[in-house]
Amino acid sequence: MAKDKSIFTCTECGGTSARWMGKCPSCNAWNTLIEGSSEPAAGKNRFGSVHASLAPTSEVLPLAQIEAADFERHPTGIDELDRVLGGGMVEGGVVLIGGDPGIGKSTLLLQAVDALQRSGMNTLYVTGEESGAQVAMRSRRLGLPDSQVPVLPEIQLEKILHTLQSRQPGIAIIDSIQTVYSDQLTSAPGSVAQVRECAAHLTRTAKSTGTTIVLVGHVTKEGALAGPRVLEHMVDTVLYFEGDTHSNFRLIRAIKNRFGAVNEIGVFAMTEKGLKGVSNPSAIFLSQHAEPVPGSCVMVTLEGTRPLLVEIQALVDSGGPSPRRLSVGLDRDRLAMLLAVLHRHAGVACMDQDVFVNAVGGVRISEPAADLAVMLAITSSLRGKALPKGFIAFGEVGLAGEVRPAPRGQDRLKEAAKLGFKVAVVPKANAPKKNDKAFEGLTIYPVERIEEAMQVVRGLD
């Protein structure tokens, strides 16, 4: 059977060309032609009759008449991964997981699929980057010498789809989507057209057969998933591996999840036997100081549904005519704004000082609730006086110097009290309204402005 002829379509105007051109012949836009397959003969859909639709044609019904049912989940046996997924794998769901090379994507998925196989689920591991022998070697290194997971070393989409149809696995791992190619297109594996086409076919297969498909995706040097942005839109869940490959700790963050909470994180430690979940992740984000040191302040951040205690460290040192502002794990532009607020409303000047801020443990904090802890850490370093032992702070600071409340402030305080912290400076709106045994042993100082927070800290010296 002859292949369909490739055709190039402009993403701007929809014009077509029989060959690739740098400029669209219709609208003159540059670099907008994307390869696709020309329309096949009548009655021959290139998606195949089996995958032509996501479900049988149904009648149109109002939402009130459609029965709503919870999605059945299949726990992987790895608690931290199940937390990020929202409780486990969902039947017919498509998961995209990305991360830097060597960070542990294949390791974690092999552990998960082996646990599901042992629980009785029919599984399939499709490897396009490694041979079957290499996967077997990793399995033995992870302490899984008798693993019964079926492995298919293949990169041709049509053969993969045929195997999925014949075996009907409950879960299939595609490692990776950038290595898979379709005969319908002439471009190389990993190109925009191939990634989009192959992902679309695999997604249709998942929805029509109920197989859970996990796609491993490459990332660019900036850390974003390689390939077209539509790849993230068509899948149900997008997970990112975070962390330094030189560190033993890894974070998995849910960027998108149709079946669970977004921004939920799972914390893992890399061991000789693979990735192991960390039951108390706050411990890895707190440095162990025998005595309090200047420039250190602990905050409670919220990652999905989980409160985490993270140590914010600041170093303020005399700089030259162009002082540096550097932050690791925090927004650099927001650091400049906080220094201006600190000067204007609290009288703490750092114009001629180098300011370095770091979130311990390699965690990235994007929420503004870190503002108050950052400012107190900077002030502590500048004054050369440590904050009291067992001290925490959180809250957003506005340009007018006001301290705004943080979401779920009560949960943050309960987590701090549970871990033995004694003093908390928090926004007034987050202070408990009544005595609660959950806060026993924790002295809470509610503040409305940054000046009040500075006065409280000076009174604790």
Image (cartoon, rainbow, N blue to C red):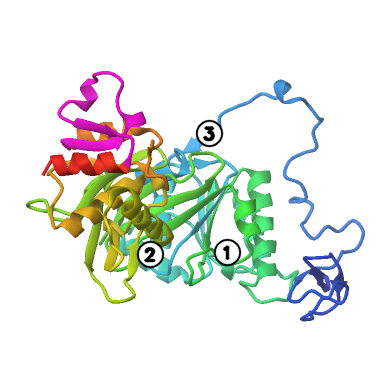
* Contact, mark 2 vs mark 3 (Cβ under 8 Å): no
The amino acid sitting under disc 2 is: Ile
Mark 2–mark 1 Cα distance, whole angstroms, equals 17 Å
* SS of the residue under disc 2: loop
Q: Is residue 216 magenta?
A: no
Marks 2, 1: nearer the viewer = 2
Residue that label 1 marks: 177
Is residue 375 at least partly visible in the picture?
yes
Q: Reply above or below: 25 against 237.
A: below
User: How far across and down, in percent of the image, does residue 12 sit?
Assistant: 79, 65
Please report whichever mark, 2 or 1, sits nearer to the chain's N-terminal start: 2
Give the residue displayed 53% in from the left and 34% down from the top.
72
Please report whichever mark, 2 or 3, sits nearer to the chain's N-terminal start: 3
* Mark 2 Cα shell of 10 Å, populated few (<14), some (14-19), many (≥20): many
* SS of the residue under disc 1: helix
Query: Image check: 84 left or right of 61?
Result: left
Q: Nearer the viewer, residue 266 or 12?
A: 12
Residue that label 3 marks: 72
Q: Point out the image quarter for the C terminus.
A: top left
Point out the stretch of residues depicted in magenta. 420-449
Labels in figure, total: 3
The amino acid sitting under disc 3 is: Glu
Residue 379, located in which quarter of the rendered image?
Answer: bottom left
Residue that label 2 marks: 103
Query: Image check: 397 left or right of 184?
Result: left
* Mark 1 Cα shell of 10 Å, populated few (<14), some (14-19), many (≥20): many
User: How far across and down, in percent of the image, does residue 171 sit?
Assistant: 53, 49
Q: Nearer the viewer, residue 270 or 316?
A: 316
User: How far across and down, in percent of the image, does residue 342 sit?
Assistant: 32, 52
Q: Residue furthest left?
A: 290
Marks 2, 3: nearer the viewer = 2
* Contact, mark 3 vs mark 1 (Cβ under 8 Å): no
